[in-house]
Amino acid sequence: MKVFDSEKIRNIAVVGHGDTGKTTLVSAFLYTSGEVNRLGKVEDGTTVTDYDEDEIERKITINTSLAYCQWKDYKINLLDTPGYRAFIFDAKSSMPAVETALVVVDAVSGVEVQTELVWSFAEEFNVPRIVVINKLDRDNASFKRTVDSLQGTLAREIVPVQLPIGEEKEFQGIIDLITNKALYYELDGKGIPKEKDIPADMQDEVAARREDLIEMIAESDDSLMEKFFEEGTLSDEDLLAGMAKSIKAGTFYPAFCTAASRNAGIATLLNAITSLCPNPLERVAVTGVNASGEDTEINVVPNGKPLAFVFKTLADPFAGRISLIKSLAGTIKSDSTLRNLGKRADERLGSLQAFQGKSHEALSEINTGDICGVLKLKETVTGDTLSDEKEGTLFKPVEYPVPSISFAIEPATRGDEDKIGQSVTRIMEEDPSLQFRRDPQTKEFILAGSGQLHIEVSVGKLKRKYGVEVLLKPPKVPYRETITGVADVQGRHKKQSGGHGQFGDCRIRMEPAERSAGFQFVDEIFGGAIPRQYIPAVEKGIIETAERGYLAGFPVVDFKVTLYDGSYHDVDSSEMAFKIAGGVAFKKGMEQAKPVLLEPTMNVEIYAPEENAGDIMGDLNSRRGRIQGMDVKGNTQVVRAQVPMAEMLNYDSSLTSMTGGRGSFQMELSHYDIVPAHLTEKIIEKAKQEAEEESK
């Protein structure tokens, strides 16, 4: 495949809410540019970028996929990203790899929850944006309503550079305000426009909007302003140059019109990408981390030693690990060796690959700013930096939010038990937003992600790719126990048998400690009532007994024990005897110290349309939640609350039902609270039943 100069490369992340037509748009790009010989359709499972079995079956994008097309003498790298909340953070990880985010909006729905989220991703990484108003041929499509939604929610600087000719079933084509031409389409999928006169009933609107566009661009540049005052207008060349400069500066976001499923407006959009979007050498610096751990800038350098970072990893059970890399400096060649700076390990790159969905073609090299795939790197994963130097600044990996939902997973068969850890690790290489751990209290394997669908898809991958079948179930709530009163007790262990006996005697005071203080042990033994060598054994006996719980088998926390007296026997006393005595004292103390259960309470943030706010707050109240505050971001209501973890185990499906799938949430542990008395007995009874079943 041809090697492209940096100036002739355009890197585009296609982002937006789910079902806005992103994958269909990418298919139209590939078809119009001649990369494929048919217009792929999501409903038929024939698109290049949605090739995973789950994607084809569910008809949604789950993983970011790389494709490319050649348009005129340019190479356009396309990252087709997910739009559903459960997978949306894959779109975030694509931002450092591109110079432009192409934000796709449904002309029927306008700005939606995830539209705002991907827009914020682009802002976070200073990525220029262009907007595509898609599905203008659908029932209830409205160009004006969508533009109002974009300007009111995202940015006033979103300005149409095209107008649709007709809407819904009357959609016929577009008017390009840049070239001042009307393009009509047969809507047969061929995408070949016919240039005609601008409709008479639209001429005044077109003239006014073009004039507004010219004035806006003229105001962004002093030299263009001078030309505008001298000539009363701008040439097409000056208009394009001014628009490109404003897009790069993030002061202007052009909005284009398409009906991607009909292949309408695609060629003009490709022209705009090549003429308006910045090339890799015009990219603002990427954030890096220096040797001191401080944030710094990594600038794009065309003539320098090779430097690249991995922005996406694909795990294939047959091809192995596939790393998608973005070059930041120099020329990277096939069969070269680069240093993984973070892992301090050399990696032989082998053959570089240009990926077209799941298929790929060998490359001899790539220039600065290009994107390619590399097969079977041994140490390198997403976020790693590859360099020709031994030391240097590291690319700063993308940060992901705390997963909002967790499931306990257990092997379906004994044979799967040994394979779980390794297989889940492979899945997590592909999807860093997943978390996997073993809960030290409940002993369960916990898989956490962005939503129930996220977890279900990940479990499906485990079975399909690695032959590991697991069962999902709600995780056990990690309750704890504590005390609310004080106790003064004696723990005495005496056992006589043939030979040496066992004797240990201790007196302790137990009292509550502050929440999250854990266990505190104070030694107030004076005068040798207990020899020094036996005091740690008393503490150990208390700790081990507290771990096994008192009310329901949950660990006892946040209490203070003061050891103040005791006695011993010269022959029969031992560390074991005092350890047992400590445990006896603890149990007696729990009887007197008014024990209670503690439950984890979560900080929860819920994002949903404004019209659902009332239902959400009512539901949270029914879950013993406490509302902490509310914010409005565009059309999205953000509700912050503290809710017991036990009440949030099924929240994902409830929120989906309340909001029609438009809501999302995230949560993290805040603190532990005392369980209300009317629930305590139920929890204790359930815990005892589970313990009995496990002992059988």
Image (tube, rainbow, N blue to C red):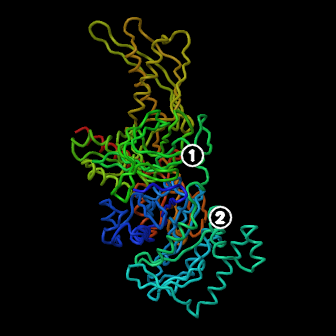
Residue 671 seen in render: yes
442 or 82: nearer the viewer: 82
Give the left or right position of residue 303, taking residue 72 as reference: right
Residue, x 59% and y 82% (percent of image)? 180
Height in image: 56 above or below 456? below
Give the left or right position of residue 140, taking residue 230 as reference: left
Which residue is label 2 attached to?
A: 245
Choose mark 1 or mark 2, whichever is in front: 1
Which residue is label 1 attached to?
A: 303
Badge 2 element:
helix
Cα separation between marks 1 and 2: 24 Å
Tell me where residue 83 appears, x and y as whole percent: 45, 64
30 or 546: nearer the viewer: 30
Height in image: 691 above or below 208? above
| Mark earlier in primary sequence (1, 2) | 2
577 or 294: nearer the viewer: 294
Tell me where residue 356 appears, x and y as whole percent: 37, 59
Quarter of the rendering containing residue 148? bottom right
- Assign the C terminus to one quadrant of the image: top left
**Circle 1 crowding by C-alpha within 10 Å: few under 14, some 14–19, many from 20:** few
Give the left or right position of residue 366, taking residue 153 as reference: left
Tell me where residue 673 appears, x and y as whole percent: 51, 46
Quarter of the rendering containing residue 660? bottom left
Badge 1 element:
loop
Which residue appears farthest toward the bottom when viewing the image? Answer: 200
Q: How many marks?
A: 2
Residue 676 seen in render: no
- Assign the N terminus to one quadrant of the image: bottom left
Residue, x 30% and y 54% (percent of image)? 460
The amino acid beneath tag 1 is Asn
**Circle 2 crowding by C-alpha within 10 Å: few under 14, some 14–19, many from 20:** some
The amino acid beneath tag 2 is Lys
